[in-house]
Image: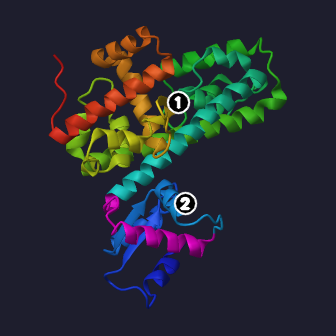
Amino acid sequence: MSVEGFKFLLSSPHINKDSTFVMESTASYHLPLYNFLLNQNRKAYIINPSLISKYKSTNTLRKTKTDPLDAVLIASYANWLEVQLEGRSSALETESKILSRSRLTNSEDLAKAKTRLKGNLSVSFPEMLKFNVYTDSMLNFLSVYGCAKDVLNATDKQIEKAIKGDRKQATPRDKELAKTIKKVSKESIGVALHASMTIHSAKTVKHLSEEDTFFTEALINIEKEIHPKEIEIITSIPGISDISAAHFMAEVEDITRFATYQKLIAFIGTDPTIYQSGKVTKNGKISKKENKILRKYCYIMATSCVHWNPVLGEYYQKKRDEGFPHRKAMVATVNKLIRTIYALLIRGEKLKMY
């Protein structure tokens, strides 16, 4: 993908100002082209790949898959629907979605890096696990000293300098921490040869933490610019933070795209699968189709609401008392939360707790 390639596409003799562009949602790979087309004031639409797959199965039994055939299939599907798909997003909404997915990827990488750091510390400097190693001060320190041997070879001033990082001078707390670390290091059972792994892990956690702060602030700011009222409404529900609301709106974009709350639940993928044959009707597991990113953040929001929202907390407990296992009760709570958010956004009202 490149600007030259995108411009070459628009220069095709088969394309004019009124041409409509339709593409599959492919994780985040389609977003640069989609954003480029929007900035060029072109009509561009995104199709759910699950719908394309279903459409293909009704038109052919062949399993051949090539890029040209896929392009024809997508165009045929768009023609069939008369291009009344998901509607158009603004360039800002596209940027917001990119930020949302970048933050999620970074968060997952950060969680793995933190696990690796603790694993490396358990070998090179296990005494440090008594501290919260994810604070700025400890990450600064561990980015320089990965084992007790290095600490014992350093002066108090050098350790204080490592702890303070980019700050102008060490605080009394930094000096106290330096003394404590020096004392603990004298009886360490750590393996000094593993120190470089710990230092690298600490630097990775520090970098990813800074990235997380950047993505979080950028996503919240852009969503408050695009959907100020929606963010205000969603965060009126106890237990939902700005960042969770921002992720929700980045994926949903426009609540009026969904004619009913059931369609929103289906889009998120927490609707139950139903099996019916003759007189037998069974509810299976949730579909887990559609938007897994949105599903994840709805689950996070519901988990928080169970603790901080008395209504949803009671609802979850009621399901547990009815014999539902934890995950099944949580899915029911997620769907109740989605219904609540949908109703509030459609009405344009904040939640009123009595």
**How would you rate the neighbour count of disc 2 (Cα within 10 Å): few for under 14, some for 14-19, many for 20 or more?**
few
**Residue shown at 76% from the left, 27% from the top:** 150
Q: What stretch is highlighted in magenta?
A: 66-92
| Secondary structure type for disc 1 | helix
**Residue shown at 19% from the left, 41% from the top:** 346
Q: Compare residues 175 and 113 and report the one nearer the observer.
A: 113
- Residue 143 is situated, as x and y percent measured from the top left of the image, at 65, 35
Q: Which quadrant of the structure image shows residue 237?
A: top left
- Quadrant (top left, top right, bottom left, bottom right) of the N terminus: bottom right
Q: Compare residues 147 and 329 and report the one nearer the observer.
A: 329
Q: In this view, does 214 lie to the left or right of 346?
A: right
**Residue shown at 42% from the left, 36% from the top:** 271
Q: In this view, does 329 lie to the left or right of 164?
A: left
- Residue 305 is situated, as x and y percent measured from the top left of the image, at 35, 22
**Magenta stretch holds residue 86:** yes
What amino acid is found at the position of numbered circle 1 in the picture?
A: Asp
Q: Which quadrant of the structure image shows residue 180?
A: top right
Q: Do the residues labelled 1 and 2 touch (CB within 8 Å)?
A: no
Compared with residue 92, is residue 6 higher up or lower down, i.e. above or below? below
| Mark nearer the viewer, 1 or 2 | 2
Query: Distance from label 1 to label 2 (Cα)?
Result: 54 Å
Compared with residue 57, is residue 270 higher up or lower down, i.e. above or below? above
What amino acid is found at the position of numbered circle 2 in the picture?
A: Ser
- Quadrant (top left, top right, bottom left, bottom right) of the C terminus: top left
Outermost bottom residue? 13
Q: Can residue 321 be seen in this view?
A: yes
Which residue was labeled with disc 2?
A: 57
Which residue was labeled with disc 1?
A: 136
Q: Is residue 75 left or right of residue 68?
A: left
